[in-house]
Amino acid sequence: MAIYDPKSMKPEEFINDEEIRATLQYAQENKDNLELIDEILEKARPKKTETGYTCAGLSHREASVLLACDNPEKIEEIYKIAEEIKLAFYGNRIVIFAPLYLSNYCVNGCVYCPYHLKNKTIPRKKLTQEEVKAEVIALQDMGHKRLAIEAGEDPKNNPIEYILECINTIYSVHHKNGDIRRVNVNIAATTVENYRKLKEAGIGTYILFQETYHKESYLKLHPTGPKHDYDYHTTAMDRAMEGGIDDVGLGVLFGLELYKYEFAGLLMHVEHLEAAHGVGPHTISVPRLKRADDINPDEFDNGIDDDTFAKITACIRLAVPYTGIIISTRENEQVRSKLLRLGVSQVSGGSRTSVGGYAGYEADERPHDTEQFDVSDQRSLDEVVAWLMENGHIPSFCTACYREGRTGDRFMSLCKSGQILNCCHPNALITLSEYIEDYASPKTKELGYKVVEKELERIPKEKVRRIASENIEEIKASNRRDFRF
């Protein structure tokens, strides 16, 4: 029998089924233990220091107790602390990105994804480099600076050489005042050598969803193809870090397995990365299973309602205070609005989940024939930017940390000490000003500069405030762009 060991490189030891089941039993037994719950909440609460805030985070067992708790007053306290942590570490900034689908060719048999090999109804498509350029220009014309590229697993059609060529093409496109400054990569588990190549290509975060940590379910949900190998998939982040990628992003697809099991497994993966590599995940995504071509989510019986989804997100924020939490356009405006208050720090905007879904289409148009999943929030990027500002958030297009070398353990140390605020807040305002000047509608522009003017006053250091203000005035007066701290 495997023994639980977060430092181990064996999946059955760092994602240990017996430990998860013991955790769920412990959580169930203590879900009404108000004294213990209060102790856990006090541990999770951010503490003010001379330089910023500090936050202890929670173990997978502690966080699972909070997730199991159904006391309304304690749930509200969980939500309140989640918001406090989000504001302490990330302020009111929300990073914006868009997915770019390169190819839907795939050799896997994943039963929840329309790209699976046996699906004969979905048109297969792979972008040429000229089509990649056209997509990038369309995204730049929207105002995007950060992309997450997506591709199915197909060694013949989507080899690592193709992915690297696409990354090079994306970074090479300079259109008007537009540039893609950060390319995050969401592709199948691969080798240390290939991760090293991705690092050398200048990627930002490597993202890979586990889908489910329940091994028996995983094998059934991935019946054929290389993704069937649970151990190889689960150790992908270890190989990525060995290959030099120190910013990695985790996630599960909620709805495939019982959510409490997934939650504990996800946090154990976080603890493994910290124990084995000294660096936890840069981001955690919280996607839910959605309808898509030949995929009916009603056929899966582990779906979660909106309230449970909110509680999961808030508990992740308490457990892993330093991580970025991502919510995509899988979710509608109402759900996204609630989760922004509970710890989410990154959102997609104006997203298309089709291969070739941007070029040649108006903001209110979208092709559906090659979509990976239904998009619930179909607003344009401009509408999303305005909505964020109307609700007290600062839309940020910043990519400075990656390009200034503030990644991995350096980013984590700055974030955990609260020091990251000293560069992120002015950078957010500078990149928002770029968006306002180059892409915003008149209404969004008027609102945007009111927000920028107000938020400049919140920068505590006079010198930083002065430089940020000077840079923003330069953006207004010229075509100079990409100022950063």
Image (cartoon, grey):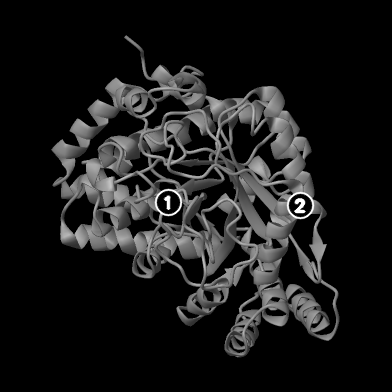
Callout 2: 10 Å neighbours few (<14), some, many (20+)? Answer: few
Q: Judging from the image, what secondary structure is the residue with disc 2 in?
A: helix
Q: How many marks?
A: 2
Of circles 1 and 2, the one toward us is 2
Callout 1: 10 Å neighbours few (<14), some, many (20+)? Answer: many
Q: Position of residue 52 (x, y in %)?
A: 57, 61
Q: Which residue is depicted at the point 82% across and 53% down?
A: 172
Could you say which quadrant of the image residue 294 lies in? top left
Left or right for 447, reference 46: right
Left or right for 340, reference 304: right
In the figure, 149 relative to 467: above or below? above
Residue furthest toward the top? 1
The answer, for residue 399, to whether it is visible in the render is no
Q: Which residue is depicted at the point 72% across and 59% down?
A: 134
Q: Which residue is depicted at the point 23% across and 48% down?
A: 37
In the figure, 352 relative to 450: above or below? above
Q: CA distance from mark 1 to mark 2?
A: 25 Å
Could you say which quadrant of the image residue 16 lies in? top left
Quadrant of the image for the C terminus? bottom right
Which residue was labeled with disc 2? Answer: 130
Left or right for 104, reference 36: right
Q: Position of residue 457 (x, y in %)?
A: 64, 83
Q: Position of residue 289 (x, y in %)?
A: 35, 47
Quadrant of the image for the N terminus? top left
Could you say which quadrant of the image residue 474 lies in? bottom right
Q: Nearer the viewer, residue 151 or 303?
A: 151
Which residue was labeled with disc 1? Answer: 373
Q: Position of residue 41 (x, y in %)?
A: 31, 52
Q: Does label 1 or label 2 sit earlier along the sequence?
A: 2
Amino acid of disc 1: Phe
